[in-house]
Image (cartoon, grey):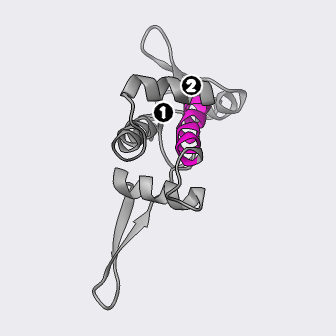
Amino acid sequence: MLLELAKSADGSFIPSTENSIAKFKKVKIGETILVDYKAKRNVQFHKKGFSLLNLIYQNQDKYESFEGMRTEFKLKAGLYELHVTTKGKTIYVPKSMSFSEMDENEFEELYSKFIDIALKHFVPMDRQDLEDAVLRFV
């Protein structure tokens, strides 16, 4: 059962959608439920992350495809799993950065790493100038 909850002023949690209210009513008084906390993602911040990547892609000439560049950003940011083949070779497999796969804190950390990578390898400007450029690009 997936419930969307909001924290109220008194510190308690209440259902925040009609669907969650209906599900919440099924929980008996005194019944304990297990909650797997995951912060809801901010769609605008997700768009900002992809705007950063698109801005860098459109102003570089190293990569032929956006996917190739995005994969390198993921690898440089540490967003990968290591797999060892039967022949003992280590393969780096990029993880997903999809909206449903990462919570807000994870994506914020990844975005910060992407900014660092862009500054180190692609754009000769300071952090604030790049952040401003991304906001204008969104």
* Secondary element at tag 2: helix
Q: Is residue 138 in view from this perspective?
A: no
Q: Furthest-left residue in view?
A: 88
Q: Residues within 10 Å of mark 1 (few under 14, many from 20)?
A: few
Quadrant where the C terminus sits is: top right
Closer mark to the observer between disc 2 and disc 1: 2
Q: Furthest-bottom residue in view?
A: 87
Please report whichever mark, 2 or 1, sits nearer to the chain's N-terminal start.
Answer: 1
Report the magenta residues as a range.
41-57
Examine the image and state in which quarter residue 79 appears.
Answer: bottom left
- In the depicted view, which residue is nearer to us: 135 or 112? 135
**How would you classify the magenta stretch by its main secondary structure?**
helix
* Secondary element at tag 1: loop
Q: Furthest-top residue in view?
A: 9
User: What residue do we see at 36% from left, 41% from top?
Assistant: 113
The residue under label 2 is: 135
Question: From the viewer's perspective, is residue 124 above or below residue 65?
Answer: above
Question: From the viewer's perspective, is residue 96 above or below residue 115?
Answer: below
Image coordinates of residue 68 in percent, x first then y, are 53, 62
Quadrant where the N terminus sits is: top right
Q: Amino acid at mark 1?
A: Ala
The residue under label 1 is: 39
Q: Amino acid at mark 2?
A: Leu
